[in-house]
């Protein structure tokens, strides 16, 4: 096991028993829909309830529109358009701009891609945010699932060029996910450091490791995997150093 693995193994057990359970956030729209027996697309509601959007109090109205301050159905749903409507903020062609209201970096990166060009022209092969992140769950596909998704075009039949692209995507995101998990663990452990001076120093190193990680993620949204790999290697070196410092309380 390498140094990073040893540090992680030592820290995981401590963190597991010390982490409080976060309170579930609420949404007026969701509260009302949960109360109805005939709500359309219940799976959509359930996916939101388990999503990062719910945990961060991003309610239905943020993407669908409508009025979340009232409970009368006609008023609450005024202005909401079906996703099939070309003017709907959740129409697949409009999703990047809608999601980009919060996820600015990925949106800016995605606009530089051939995928975005296809999406704007209405080409059904053009992926949108929900292609990789689901319509509402806001989750990341596993590297294996991402490879399968990319293979619909960049696969053996080569609907689009570069059949190796799907395999490369899987390899890149397997590495990226490993570093991402180390950063998450490091951040959680730093918050539990009592010494303010040491905590501030560790937080500074955490931010230094997060910068290339963010750049790698944005490169992924441009589908430029050589750039993703370059930033990811820098992030990995920095997070290994950070994890070693957290594990060694004497420094």
Image (cartoon, rainbow, N blue to C red):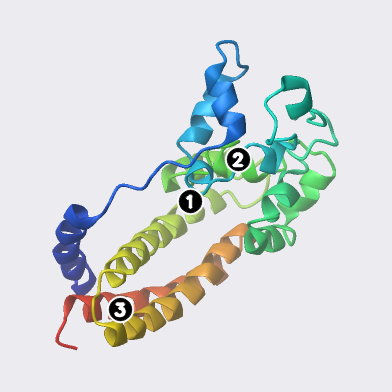
Say which residue appears at 40% left-offset and 62% top-offset: 180
- Residue annotated with mark 3: 242
- Residue annotated with mark 1: 167
Residue 107 placement, left or right of 171: right
Looking at marks 2 and 1 on the same chain, the residue that comes earlier in the sequence is marked by: 2
**Number of callouts:** 3
Residue 224, relative to residue 48: is it above or below?
A: below
Residue 155 visible at all:
no
Name the quarter where the C terminus is drawn: bottom left
Q: Position of residue 207 (x, y in %)?
A: 44, 77
Residue 99 placement, left or right of 11: right
Residue 48, relative to residue 109: is it above or below?
A: above
Name the quarter where the N terminus is drawn: bottom left
Contact (Cβ within 8 Å) of mark 3 with mark 2: no
Is label 3 in a helix, a strand or a loop? helix
Kindly report which numbered mark, 3 or 2, lies closer to the viewer in this rendering.
Answer: 2
Disc 2 packing (10 Å; few <14; some 14–19; many ≥20): many
Disc 3 packing (10 Å; few <14; some 14–19; many ≥20): many
- Residue annotated with mark 2: 59
């Amino acid at each position: 096991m390498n140094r990073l693995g040893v540090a992680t193994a030592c820290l995981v057990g401590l963190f597991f028993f010390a982490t409080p359970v976060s309170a579930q956030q609420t949404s007026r729209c969701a509260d009302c829909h949960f109360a109805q027996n005939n709500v359309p697309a219940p799976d959509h509601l359930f996916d939101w309830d388990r999503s990062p959007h719910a945990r961060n109090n991003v309610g239905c109205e943020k993407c669908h529109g409508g009025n979340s301050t009232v409970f009368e159905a006609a008023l609450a749903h005024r202005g909401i358009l079906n996703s099939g409507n070309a003017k709907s903020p959740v129409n697949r062609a409009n999703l990047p701009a809608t999601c980009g209201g919060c996820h600015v970096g990925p949106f800016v990166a995605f606009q530089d891609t051939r995928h975005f060009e296809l999406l704007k022209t209405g080409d059904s092969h053009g992926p949108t945010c929900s292609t990789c992140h689901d319509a509402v769950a806001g989750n990341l596909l596993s590297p294996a699932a991402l490879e399968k998704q990319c293979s619909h075009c960049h696969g053996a039949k080569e609907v689009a060029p570069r059949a190796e692209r799907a395999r490369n995507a899987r390899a890149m995101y397997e590495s990226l996910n490993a570093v991402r998990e180390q950063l998450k663990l490091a951040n959680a452990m730093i918050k539990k450091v009592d010494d303010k001076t040491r905590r501030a120093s560790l937080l500074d190193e955490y931010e230094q490791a997060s910068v290339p990680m963010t750049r790698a993620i944005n490169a992924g949204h441009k589908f430029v995997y050589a750039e993703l790999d370059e930033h990811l290697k820098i992030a990995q070196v920095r997070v290994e150093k950070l994890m070693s410092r957290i594990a060694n309380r004497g420094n």
